[in-house]
Image: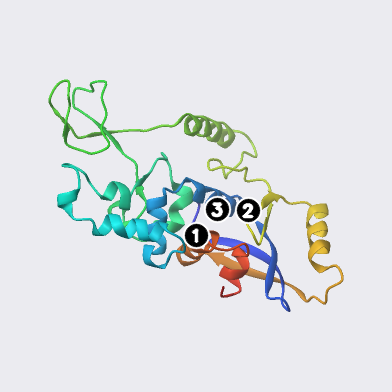
């Protein structure tokens, strides 16, 4: 992500206090798509489990309150309460990582460690004893998923080509403007699609259309995550201060 703030242009109906759609670039679309990669334990921690609708919050708090004497030996409850994101480059989630490092953030980066002898073993925690050479596994190694390797290769290729895509990486291409509806339906934007959507929401109604420019940072990112879990009018709830 190029910066800690993302710009967004909204088309709103001032009378209905509703966002019709947003014109968004790659960074915002990458961010909302990346919400699908969040483990449910990380979601509960981010939005405060006690405020969540449904049963997930109560389940999270049950684990948090469970006495250590009832847990299996060696069990680390943080594996459930603060799970790591299985993603080699979680930059799309930077808006939710907060201002601290990985250890202070509810979204930690998944890490792998091996021993000094580089045996064919890996551990998710540092300083575990290697089962082969018995040395401590304290050397961090890169964890690369197949799609990440392909994305890196594409980024290198595009950056060296004239007019390459500066927004390489993430999930969608950066040379396209996207239309994001109030309920977070994302499609490539065109004049026809925007006119069609405007007509759908305004036909036969007394409306007052206006544009609104907003920025999305950590607070808005968290608000979007909370709204996604409970609402079909996500953009209106977050950017027009609608209460449900």
Residue 70: image tag: none
The image position of residue 148, as x and y in percent, is 48, 34
- Give the quarter of the figure containing the C terminus: bottom right
Q: Give the CA distance from mark 1 to mark 3.
A: 8 Å
> In the image, residue 185 lies at what x, y percent?
66, 53
Q: Position of residue 31 (x, y in %)?
A: 53, 52
Tell me how far mark 1 sits from mark 2, CA to CA.
Answer: 19 Å
Give the camera-side residue of 150 and 205: 205
The local crowd at label 1, few if under 14, some if 14 to 19, many if 20 or more residues have their Cα within 10 Å, is some
Pointer 3: what residue? Answer: 32
Choose between 125 and 23: the one closer to the eye: 125
CB contact under 8 Å: marks 1 and 2: no
For the residues bearing labels 2 and 3, Cβ distance under 8 angstroms: no
* Dot in front, 1 or 2: 1
Residue drawn at the location 58% of the way across and 44% of the way down:
166
Taking the spot 14% from the left edge, 51% from the top edge, the residue there is 69
Looking at the rendered image, the disc whose residue lies closer to the viewer, 1 or 3, is 1
According to the picture, the residue beneath numbered tag 2 turns out to be: 25
> Which mark sits nearer the N-terminus, 1 or 2?
2
The residue drawn where x is 66% and y is 62% is: 182
Residue 71 visible, this orientation:
yes
- What is the C-alpha distance between the residues marked 2 and 3? 11 Å
Mark sitting earlier along the chain (2/3)? 2
Left or right: where 156 falls relative to 67: right
Q: Nearer the viewer, mark 2 or mark 3?
A: 3
The one of 214 and 45 positioned closer to us in this rendering: 45
Q: Which residue is mark 1?
A: 225
């Amino acid at each position: 992500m190029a910066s800690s703030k993302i710009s967004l242009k909204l088309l709103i109906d001032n009378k209905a206090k509703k966002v019709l759609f947003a014109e968004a670039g790659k960074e915002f679309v990458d961010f909302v798509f990346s919400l699908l990669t969040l483990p449910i334990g990380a979601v509960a921690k981010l939005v405060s489990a006690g405020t969540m609708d449904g049963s997930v919050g109560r389940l999270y708090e049950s684990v948090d309150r469970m006495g250590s004497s009832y847990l299996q030996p060696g069990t680390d409850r943080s594996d459930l309460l603060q799970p790591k994101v299985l993603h080699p480059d979680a930059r799309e989630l930077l808006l939710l990582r907060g201002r601290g490092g990985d250890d202070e953030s509810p979204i930690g980066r998944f890490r792998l460690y091996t021993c000094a002898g580089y045996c064919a073993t890996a551990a998710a925690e540092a300083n575990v004893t290697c089962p082969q050479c018995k040395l401590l596994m304290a050397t961090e190694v890169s964890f690369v998923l197949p799609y990440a390797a392909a994305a890196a290769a594409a980024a290198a290729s595009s950056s060296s080509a004239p007019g390459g895509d500066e927004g390489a990486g993430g999930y969608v291409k950066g040379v396209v403007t996207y239309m994001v509806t109030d309920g977070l339906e994302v499609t490539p934007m065109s004049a026809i699609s925007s006119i069609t959507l405007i007509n759908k929401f305004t036909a036969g109604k007394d409306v007052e259309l206006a544009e609104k420019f907003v920025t999305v940072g950590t607070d808005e990112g968290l608000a979007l995550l909370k709204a996604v879990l409970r609402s079909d009018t996500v953009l209106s709830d977050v950017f027009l201060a609608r209460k449900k």
